[in-house]
Image (tube, grey):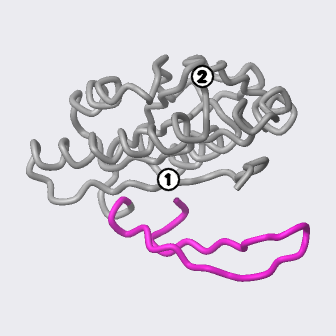
């Protein structure tokens, strides 16, 4: 969220391959509150801290709820909430507090039990996340994204704010049979 037009480099292995530009003017033009789903995870922590630096108020929703132990002073300014984004009402209840100008979805599952590789997720996860036995790519990554999009649309319609910016991030899929 560094500015209305942020650049990043897509890396494959360790070699830079392509340069992309993201248009972020819809959130950047109005500072306000951002809801970061998965805000205690590897990516979510970084997104939340950067949003603070850019002047946003940040609420993070995650199963853990509490900030990471290795955090610094900036995490004290983040409103951490414990909850499950698989439950749309959990997301909606936070948005209904008002003042939100965007949602950033940082929930992801690299390896699930249906792939046969679930026990290795603790090694693949940058934050050491351990999924429950019912966690699959569909329930963790897709369902939470759909719930957040539905909640964002309802929030925008109810508050007559036009469109609610929604940003989706996804981890690499691994171990899928098809």
Could you tell me residue 157's position as x and y percent? Answer: 11, 48
Instruction: Residue 120: say if magenta.
Output: no
Q: Magenta span covers which residues?
A: 1-27
In the drawing, what numbered circle is on residue 54? 1
Q: Position of residue 140 (x, y in %)?
A: 55, 35
Quarter that holds the C terminus: bottom right
Which residue is pictured at 76% across the width and 50% down the height?
A: 174
**Residue at the farthest right position:** 14
Q: Is residue 17 magenta?
A: yes
**Percent from the top left, x then y, of residue 32?**
32, 46
Q: Residues within 10 Å of mark 1 (few under 14, many from 20)?
A: some
Q: Residue at x 58, y 47 (%)?
A: 47
Taking depth in this image into account, of 41 and 175 the one nearest to the observer is 175
For mark 2, does the 10 Å Cα neighbourhood hold few (<14), some (14 to 19), or many (20 or more) residues? few
2 or 1: mark nearer the eye:
2
User: Helix, strand, or loop for circle 1?
Assistant: loop
The Cα–Cα distance between marks 2 and 1, rounded to whole angstroms, is 37 Å
Tell me the number on the disc at residue 134: 2
* Element on which disc 2 rests: loop
Residue 84 x/y as whole percent:
46, 23
The picture quadrant where one finds residue 98 is top left
Q: Quadrant of residue 49?
A: top right
In the image: residue 141, left or right of residue 114:
left
């Amino acid at each position: 969220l560094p500015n209305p037009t942020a650049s990043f480099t897509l890396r494959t292995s360790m070699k830079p391959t392509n340069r992309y530009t993201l248009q972020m003017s819809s959130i950047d033009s109005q500072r306000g509150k951002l809801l970061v789903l998965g805000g205690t995870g590897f990516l979510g922590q970084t997104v939340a801290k950067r949003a603070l630096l850019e002047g946003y108020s940040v609420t993070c929703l995650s199963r853990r709820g509490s900030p990471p132990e290795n955090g610094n002073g900036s995490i004290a300014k983040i409103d951490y909430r414990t909850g499950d984004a698989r439950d749309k009402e959990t997301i909606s209840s936070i948005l209904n507090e008002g003042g939100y100008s965007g949602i950033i979805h940082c929930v992801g599952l690299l390896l699930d039990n249906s792939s046969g590789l679930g026990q290795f997720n603790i090694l693949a996860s940058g934050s050491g996340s351990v999924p429950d036995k019912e966690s699959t790519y569909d329930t963790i990554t897709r369902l939470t994204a759909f719930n957040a999009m539905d909640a964002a649309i309802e929030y925008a319609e109810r508050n007559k704010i036009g469109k609610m910016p929604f940003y989706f991030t996804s981890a690499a899929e691994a171990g899928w049979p098809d």
